[in-house]
Amino acid sequence: MKLLRLMIQARRVDERLIKICRQGRLRGSAFAGIGQEAISAAVAVASQPDDLFAPCIRNLPLHLGRGETPLGVFRQALGRAKSPTGGRDGNVHYGRLDHGVYTMISHLGSMISVVAGGVMAKRRQGKDTVGVAFVGDGATSTGDFHEALNFAAVFDIPLLVIIENNHYAYSTPTSHQYRCHRLADRAVGYGIDGYSADGNNPAEIYITVRDILNDIRANPRPALLEADTMRMRGHGEHDDFKYVPETLLQVYRRRDPIRMGIRGMQAAKLITDDQIEAMELEIADEIDRSARQALSEEEPLADTLTQGVYRDA
Amino acid sequence: MREITYLQGIQEGLREVLKTDPTSVIYGQDVGAFGGAFKVTEGLQAEFGEARVFDTPISESAMLGAAIGMATQGMRPIVEMQFADFITTAMHQLLNNAGTRHYRTGDAVPMVVRVPSGGGTGGGPFHSEELETYFCHMPGVKVVYPAFPSDARSLLLSAAQDPNPVVFMENKTLYRSVKERVGDDLTALPLGKASVRHEGDDAVVITYGAMVHEALRAVSELHVTEGYEVMVVDLRSLKPYDLDTILAATAATSRVLVVSEGWRTCGYAAEIATAINESAFHLLDAPVHRLTAPDVPVPFAKSLEDRYRPAAADIVKALRDLIEL
């Protein structure tokens, strides 16, 4: 139920962001994770308070699951003074360390080593922390992906690197990104375990993630998980994604993770139509209030431009 | 009082940090049992254990990324780049990931990156670079560059007490060639404070790193040959830098030569010259002069590198031109 709620909440936030973007009120573009919600929702639900995360572009359910609010997300996208980054950064570059969530940079693969170092520190402090870093299929081609996985393997850092294989890195299909059969097979080269799972099946991805996290928490070492999914929109809303064949989108539309989650729960009689409707209404109400509030708020004062570059000694 | 080398100064600073700050760790390539390519960390692993001083794979980017992760979770990582030149494969971690973090998130990133720098050792293009300009250009990053053993020791402590990413530049030619008598009291030196190494009023040389020693040789030669009294300012901190001392030296001498081992175009010397022009143009009797390496890769052959790298004789000539202008 928690997993389903996170997926629906993230979907509705993304839809609202797209609307605000189309109205021309967003700064820059909106970067939706529609269709990929199950993976990071599963991670959020399977995680423990001391765990650390390096989310990437399409991991809104993780942020929400770790304590960020829709209001914070709208403020961030709008560059408001009260946003998690105070308007210094935008769109998907946010996170709060008190939620265990690192703020990403745009250089793909570069956050994996950061969360690895964070987990090393927490473990030295006696915590049973594990880390989860998210990357897409494109980031697997970077040197940083390799450096960080090898580094984590050498030091037996309990870090799960999840490749959300959504078939396109911006416009580049996986056929132009790598030649291996499965990206999960790369784990062998690092001496770690590699897993594959259906990233659009909430039950399957949740059980997979939960079991891996339990395993590496008890026996510290990294692991690699390739989750198959599909980016159902452009890289950002500025992108018409004409390069994605409609037939491929159709396949994944039928396998929408929210639809699959609801069907599974209905089949197991874990949820009723009334409960779904109540959940949707509650989420819609919060999102509407949050969006309106964020839209009404101020941007940071221009005079604060040069403040906070350094921490005072 | 006892005499220590520049290398020992750095090592004593590292030892003091490991002793006094239980959250500190030192890591890098070959820094553990081997003691580092230059033996700066020799003996530290034996003294403090493998958990505090350890080797990593050859992964400059992962090394710096992990440092950001540790620094934001209560640790104090001190990372050694084997040679300054190799940090270029991880520049995004410093510029984008470490340098922007406090501004964007408010999180402190207390980490030190040691970069053995500079030429004059026959190291060729990839073991000789002097990259301070790159580091100083990065918002959110601080840069120090000691020239003397006592400063190396004290600045290492200051760098390791600062809540920001600090690039600690150390010059390879000074490791064993520069000695100084020091006491046993280790105190941190505030960042951003220059030191006047030689008094004088005919001109001033503003410099840092190995060039401080070349400048001191040059001004003593000029004193003997021509009787000129030339001030030498050792910047010690490159970012933030000590504008007050720079302007006071400009006011006292009216003739300024900035010397840098780095490349010329858009180099650190240009920054200092510009800062003087902006704030003290009316005090100058001559344009601020620069003496730097030319814009060429660091060459290998001795004949070429001797021409490439500014030395005392070049400083003597530049000062003569400046004073007699």
Image (cartoon, coloured by chain):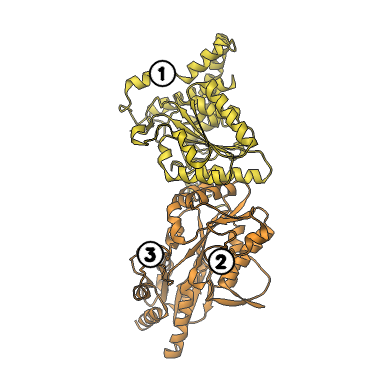
Chain colours: A yellow, B orange
- Location of residue B183 with respect to A274 vertically, above or below: below
Secondary structure of the residue carrying tag 2 is: loop
Whole-number angstrom distance, CA of label 3 to CA of label 2? 22 Å
**Chain ID at mark 3:** B
**Front position among marks 1 and 2:** 2
Residue at the (58%, 31%) spot, across then down: A212
Which residue in the structure is indicated by mark 2? B39
Identify which residue, B46 or A170, lies in the foreground. B46
Do the residues marked 1 and 2 share a common chain? Answer: no
Residue B45 picture location, percent across and down: 63, 59
Residue B228 in view here: no
Residue A8 picture location, percent across and down: 51, 21
Residue A280 picture location, percent across and down: 53, 16
Residue at the (55%, 11%) spot, across then down: A266
B124 sits to left or right of B164:
left
Identify which residue, A298 or B324, lies in the foreground. B324
Q: Earlier in the sequence, mark 3 or mark 2?
A: 2
Q: Amino acid at mark 2?
A: Lys
- Location of residue B121 with respect to B59 vertically, above or below: below
Whole-number angstrom distance, CA of label 1 to CA of label 2? 60 Å
Q: Amino acid at mark 1?
A: Arg
**Chain ID at mark 1:** A
Which residue in the structure is indicated by mark 1? A253
Whole-number angstrom distance, CA of label 3 to CA of label 1? 55 Å
Which residue in the structure is indicated by mark 3? B125
